[in-house]
Image: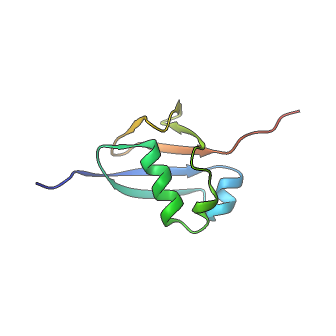
Amino acid sequence: MTTPAGTVRVRFFARYAELVGREEAALSLSLPATVGDVVRRVREELPGGAEIPERPVAAVNLRHARLEAPVRDGDEVALLPPIAGG
């Protein structure tokens, strides 16, 4: 029996986009998967990805999400660096 696979679009903002050299990437992964799985893959596979924290602020389909949140085929996962305000 094969494990189902899906593709998620990962969007990088501000400093994270600078680190990986792009604003978005498509990642294929085995399902079921979580936001944490996506972050791990980004950190392991993308140049500069290891510089992204293990627990970044994340959103799935424009809604804030914890690392344990599920992702499905076609979802968009955004990784957001902390924002400093004044």
Task: Looking at this view, name the residue that lies furthest to the left.
Answer: 1
59 up-or-down from 30: above or below: above
> Nearest the camera: 85 or 66?
66
Task: Looking at this view, name the residue that lies furthest to the bottom.
Answer: 47
Task: Looking at this view, name the residue that lies furthest to the front.
Answer: 54
**How has the structure been colored for display?**
rainbow
Q: Position of residue 52 (x, y in %)?
A: 62, 54
Q: Residue at x 43, y 34 (%)?
A: 69
44 up-or-down from 37: above or below: below
Which image quadrant: the C terminus? top right
Q: Is residue 17 left or right of residue 27?
A: right
Q: Position of residue 67 (x, y in %)?
A: 48, 38
Q: Residue at x 68, y 45 (%)?
A: 81
Which image quadrant: the N terminus? bottom left
Q: Position of residue 79 (x, y in %)?
A: 58, 46
Q: Is residue 85 left or right of residue 6?
A: right
Q: Position of residue 56 (x, y in %)?
A: 60, 44
15 up-or-down from 79: above or below: below
Task: Looking at this view, name the residue that lies furthest to the right.
Answer: 86
Q: Residue at x 44, y 36 (%)?
A: 68
